[in-house]
Image (spheres, coloured by chain):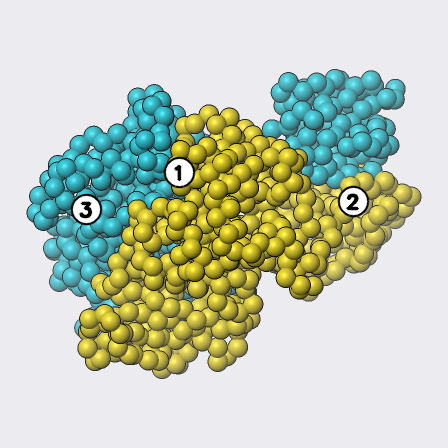
Chain colours: A cyan, B yellow
Amino acid sequence: MAYTVPMPVRQHDHVSTIAPVTGADERVRVTYRLFGDQNEAAALARKIAFEQSVELPEAQVPDEIRQQVVGRVEEISPEAGIESARRATISYDARHAGAHLSQLLNLIFGNVSIYPRVRLLDLELPQGYLDGFKGPRFGIDGLRTLTGVHGRPLLATALKPRGAPVESLAAIARDFALGGGDIVKDDQNLADDFETFKRRVEACARAVDEANARSGRRCLYFPHIAAPAAELNRYLDYVTALGLHGVLICPMILGLETTRDIAARHSLVLMAHPALTGSFTQSSDQGIDHGLLLGTLFRTAGADISIFPNFGGRFSYSREECLAISRRLREPLGALSSAWPSPGGGMAIDKLDVMGDDYGADAIFLVGGALFAHNRELREGTRAFMEAIRARFQERLTPPSDPASTQVEDAVEIQRYFPFQEGFQWKGRESSPYKDAGDLAFKGVRRVELVGKFGERTSCDLRYFEVQPGGHTSREKHLHTHIIIGARGEAVLALGNRRLPFSQHDIAYIAPLEVHQLINETDEPFGFYCVVDHNRDRPMKP
Amino acid sequence: MAYTVPMPVRQHDHVSTIAPVTGADERVRVTYRLFGDQNEAAALARKIAFEQSVELPEAQVPDEIRQQVVGRVEEISPEAGIESARRATISYDARHAGAHLSQLLNLIFGNVSIYPRVRLLDLELPQGYLDGFKGPRFGIDGLRTLTGVHGRPLLATALKPRGAPVESLAAIARDFALGGGDIVKDDQNLADDFETFKRRVEACARAVDEANARSGRRCLYFPHIAAPAAELNRYLDYVTALGLHGVLICPMILGLETTRDIAARHSLVLMAHPALTGSFTQSSDQGIDHGLLLGTLFRTAGADISIFPNFGGRFSYSREECLAISRRLREPLGALSSAWPSPGGGMAIDKLDVMGDDYGADAIFLVGGALFAHNRELREGTRAFMEAIRARFQERLTPPSDPASTQVEDAVEIQRYFPFQEGFQWKGRESSPYKDAGDLAFKGVRRVELVGKFGERTSCDLRYFEVQPGGHTSREKHLHTHIIIGARGEAVLALGNRRLPFSQHDIAYIAPLEVHQLINETDEPFGFYCVVDHNRDRPMKP
């Protein structure tokens, strides 16, 4: 139902596994704020280097492990402006840093989060390691392409309050879009069962869509995704199927690694909400630095936009903390796209000049109550705000000339219909030799990959296998399961210690780690369909 | 390879969805620590009640929403012993509390985590809401049944350091088990790609297994699970397939809702590690109370065991904080099982008397270096520690007489082989009328559920459908996909706007939201196999 925009989407080449390629001398560098004199800080830093890597007292660590695994204290220096504070940098061999965000977080701050008065300030990841994280899928350029707005900050607002009828929320979305707003997102308090979610999101999406049809603009609607873990992908798939282009999520509630997985798996703009981050950022002598958490770490996890409470609002951030987040989102960080700072809370039209100076054009101003200021209706208030933004910035409707950002990715055409042909062939699919058995022995087997390997959204693949007279599949076991259906001829199904006759329309379920093999002892070909999990482990010898 | 123990496992009746049944007057009660005089605290509590529910200033909230959705300030009272601190209790209608742990966390602490000097102290969930969370699957009774140890605390240790060869880790596991230890867990720094993980875990599991065979005891081995989000279940399935009974996880790194999902999905003891919790608990005027986070919330998320740094060790917990966690894990909490406190760090044999007084018999003492004290070998050190525990507590090898805890659940026997029979029937499976189409129209269809609905571990179900002459399936669409394979007769496959002939061995893929129907316009029955995602959305009208 929503429009489709060609967009320069970054290809995430592998969804499920992060396997950073790191060289022997690449190091992860972590900087903490500690308190005490130089000697005290050095002793504490050394303790942390052991705590975070091997969690053993020095005396119990063999030399080789000390050299390869234990952190190395690189530098300790006084920190300007904070009484008795020091910056201590510890480095770890990147090969021991853990291959995903959960373990990285564990390495840099797991146990030491429980030390009194230690704050995580900075993190430098070597290029090879950083390449394992794809970061923002859209980033600043991608979202500009989606909205078609260049040269000025974007204007966003939130649908609220929880408890309001769907029509009221949809009306807010429509009026904001008609007033010229760029992004309307759900409030993070909106979270419902799937059916309620669908009704609300569809109504709001339609309202924005209709407004866009009238205005000729491209306002985007981002629903809030918060669901039981097993249902997250269902909610996200629904949003994609509706034609929406982004979502709001809370990374510190979902977990950073879950956030990365969502970014890798769904072609959606991720707008990150700071819920629960306060416990990390609040205190200057513990927790995690504002810029590192809401900037670097959120961006590494794939956030395209990071919302934070602007200084001067009802929360407690200082101007310096806000600007640090903003800088971290946009500074060079390996090959990762830069992301949008989205200051929100307590914003007003008369602050726009200052905000423009502080954040520049590549920011998303998240505005709520101020759109209603001077007793304006929402549509009019949005229009007034947009005028103020345009007065401060030079809007352009085309991107600065950069051919890279106008590349269009072709959608994959997925074939749906495979008529059967003589000799157990299918139109549109080719036979291939059976070859994914590694070093497992098989004989006289051909394979046709039918469905699942060509971009389909199934959780299983369907294949056809044919075993020649005297042939057999490999005898193997694995954690994943099979369902097999006899298609032609006759064979023996060896299942554990049993030998079972297996012919057309017979069906079997192969359970995890059950040893199995199909053996054709007849003079005719034996064929069977095999349904198998799309994501699966490698077969093992029995 | 590991032994099998009959165990009183709690049945989790629904894995993927938490849908608490809550009545109209049930309320979630949240208590915060605030600072200021009575009036200041009242004003701040009121602000929080709006912030956390509707995130709007009072003047902008319609009366009905104010009554139904906005939090109600229930009580404000001075907090003894802390200068100018007050306890403020706010209640919310449970129907607006969100139906899963992510949203509950958002409600009780999302935005307000960013307020200066507000600490989350307590949470009371109404029974109906709490029933939606199954809590610990094993709890104290279940783990006692697994280990066969009653009447005394359990002794646990960790495999470390990272970087040590697999054989060294396995030797630690073996010696600890031979010395009489109860649980050996991975260090949380151990996290690897799947193949490395398998090698290490299999070696350690075998070592413990062999030790158990020699000792006649049941020491358990819990590997650490930290993997890319999409692979968590693969690691957990492997652990289950190996015959292990539990795992170590870090709930605040994975996310509480992911933790609950793991507990609901896998029949494994969850031992929770406190990594990253320090940022919440450290400061007495912000973050989350120790007992609430590591006790109540971890237990609600399904932790059977909660590790925390014991007082007097190298971390910063006080005795009161440790005892609060211990109490929260074991106090009555709806129908949830009680869970094990596991104090660790800096423990020694001569502290056992005090620890016994503080924690009682239902605790797991996590001991590292102290097992090597007095230059003992690990096996001997473990034996000495166990003797000290037995000297303080009366060990029993049978549970106190309670028939409920000796109930044994029969394993489900999953059928694997379904020979085809005349008339398109399968031995072991029955035909049923086609009935899951809701209000969608169909005619003359019978269905045989073949694989997937009977406890199999497939991600897809396989069904056979048969359409009588003149009959048809319902015309529908849905987010989930189908793969269909012609089995007998001929039909028309209506796919979007296309009408395609469909007969034996023809194959089609039905993509998300593609309208489809099968129509039998012949005089013979038409049959087809249908592969469909096990977890799927309800079909919709086109």
Q: Between B388 and A359, which is closer to the camera in this rendering?
A: B388
Image quarter of residue A494? top right
Q: Residues within 10 Å of mark 1 (few under 14, many from 20)?
A: some
Q: Are marks 1 and 3 on the same chain?
A: no
- Asked if labels 3 and 2 touch by Cβ distance under 8 angstroms, the answer is no
Label 3: how many Cα within 10 Å (few below 14, some 14–19, many 20+): some
Q: Distance of mark 2 from mark 1, alpha carbons?
A: 53 Å
Quadrant of the rendered image containing residue A509: top right
Looking at the rendered image, the disc whose residue lies closer to the viewer, 2 or 1, is 1
Q: Position of residue A508 (x, y in %)?
A: 78, 38
Q: Quadrant of the C terminus of chain A?
A: top right
Instruction: Name the residue rendered at 62%, 38% in the picture.
Output: B215
Are marks 2 and 3 in one subunit?
A: no
Q: Which residue is mark 2?
A: B415
The spot of residue A286 in percent (x, y) is 23, 50
Does residue A471 show up? yes
Badge 2 element: loop
- Vertical position of residue A440 compared to residue B460: above or below: above
Tell us which disc is closer to us: 1 or 3.
1
- What amino acid type is highlighted by mark number 3? Ala
User: Distance between the Cα atoms at labels 1 and 3?
Assistant: 48 Å
Q: Label 1: which residue?
A: B373
Q: Chain of mark 3?
A: A
Q: Along the horizontal axis of the image, is A502 left or right of B484?
A: right
Per the rendering, the mark at residue A186 is: none
Residue nearer the viewer, B290 or B470: B290
**Dot 2 and dot 1 residues touching (CB under 8 Å):** no
Of the residues tagged 2 and 3, which is closer to the observer?
A: 2
User: How far apart in space, not on screen, are marks 2 and 3 (Cα)?
Assistant: 60 Å
Amino acid identity at mark 2: Gln
Q: Amino acid at mark 1?
A: Ala
Picture residue at 81% right of the left edge, 40% below the top = B417
